[in-house]
């Protein structure tokens, strides 16, 4: 094993030892690769379902614009006030379409106050393929504004699903690139702090650079990581790491059965002060 340099973000270089290929964790067939592939497939499936659901939903609520609705005179037959997340009014309608009598109910998303009384004639916009789907012209502003509301909410859901897809595929591609272009290295840093937030662990580590000056860097990874026992602050750890100077890293060790994908970060002076270092 020959002396090497470990490249971390912000140009930090730390002396390390190159692991021979036979000692380094394998990528092909590894549990890490299968897990990252599975997450990417799940993310792609979620994004596809959200996209298809958004298209179907948006097509349904915009049908009055493109579905060839027909305007016909209709008679209001009843008013039915009810409560569902606010006061509503169901207006019963009767109309003739293509020579056939039909009845339907329309909700103007308002109370019955000021709504057409029974026996009042109104103009109804009717879906020719489904006469139960009607709008009362002049009282349908809420329904005609729904596309804008759903477009906004669908954009949020698509953005979230897209971000999840980008994150999972980016992590997989980064891990695959690291294993094909970089070499595993061994480092023995001292653990300064170990913190957990939700399902993520962050290790604050210290190791000397090429001039012997102690340098602080941080590694974050999901769960407890690959370690059989939790890292203990104040002690040194035998760390196997795969890095290319960017934020993505792979982590393992001599006692670990698998590797874990994580991120590396070099805190600035302000961050070090807030950590009390």
Image (cartoon, helix red, strand yellow):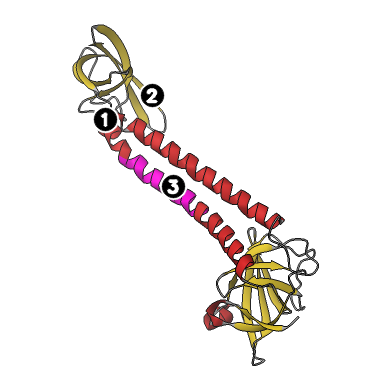
Taking the spot 81% from the left edge, 67% from the top edge, the residue there is 255
The span from disc 1 to disc 3 (Cα, nearest Å) is 24 Å
Asked if residue 146 is positioned above or below residue 42 in the image, the reply reads above
Asked if residue 116 is positioned above or below residue 144 in the image, the reply reads above
Q: Which residues are magenta?
A: 148-164
Mark positioned earlier in the residue sequence (1 or 3): 1
What is the magenta segment's predominant secondary structure?
A: helix
- What secondary structure is found at the residue carrying circle 2? strand
Query: Mark 2 Cα within 10 Å, few/some/many (few <14, many 20+)?
Result: few
Mark positioned earlier in the residue sequence (2 or 1): 1
The quarter of the image holding the N terminus is bottom right
* x then y, percent, for residue 29: 71, 55
Taking the spot 56% from the left edge, 55% from the top edge, the residue there is 168
The quarter of the image holding the C terminus is bottom right
What residue did someone put label 2 on? 82
Say the numbered circle drawn on residue 66. Answer: 1
As for residue 90 lying within the magenta part, the answer is no
What residue did someone put label 3 on? 158
Could you say which is closer to the camera, residue 107 or residue 264? 264
């Amino acid at each position: 094993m020959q002396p090497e340099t470990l490249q971390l973000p912000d140009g930090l270089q730390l002396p390390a030892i190159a692991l021979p290929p036979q000692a380094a964790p394998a990528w092909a067939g590894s549990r890490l690769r299968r897990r990252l592939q599975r997450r990417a497939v799940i993310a792609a499936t979620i994004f596809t379902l959200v996209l298809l659901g958004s298209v179907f939903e948006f097509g349904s609520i915009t049908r009055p614009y493109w579905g060839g609705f027909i305007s016909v005179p209709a008679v209001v037959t009843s008013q039915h006030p009810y409560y569902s997340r606010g006061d509503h009014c169901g207006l019963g309608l009767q109309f003739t379409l293509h020579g056939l009598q039909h009845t339907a109910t329309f909700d103007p998303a308002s109370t019955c106050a000021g709504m057409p009384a029974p026996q009042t004639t109104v103009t109804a916009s009717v879906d020719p393929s489904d006469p139960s789907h009607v709008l009362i012209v002049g009282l349908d502003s809420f329904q005609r504004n729904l596309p804008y509301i759903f477009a906004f909410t669908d954009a949020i859901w698509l953005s979230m699903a897209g971000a999840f897809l980008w994150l999972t595929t980016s992590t997989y591609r980064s891990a695959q690139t690291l294993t094909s272009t970089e070499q595993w290295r061994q480092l023995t840093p001292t653990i300064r702090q170990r913190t957990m937030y939700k399902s993520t662990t962050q290790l604050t580590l210290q190791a000397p650079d090429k001039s012997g000056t102690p340098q602080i860097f941080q590694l974050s990874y999901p769960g407890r990581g690959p370690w059989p026992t939790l890292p203990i602050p104040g002690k040194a750890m035998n760390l196997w790491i795969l890095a290319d100077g960017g934020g993505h890293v792979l982590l393992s060790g001599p006692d670990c059965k698998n590797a874990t994908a994580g991120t590396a970060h070099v805190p600035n002076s302000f961050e070090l002060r807030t950590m009390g270092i």
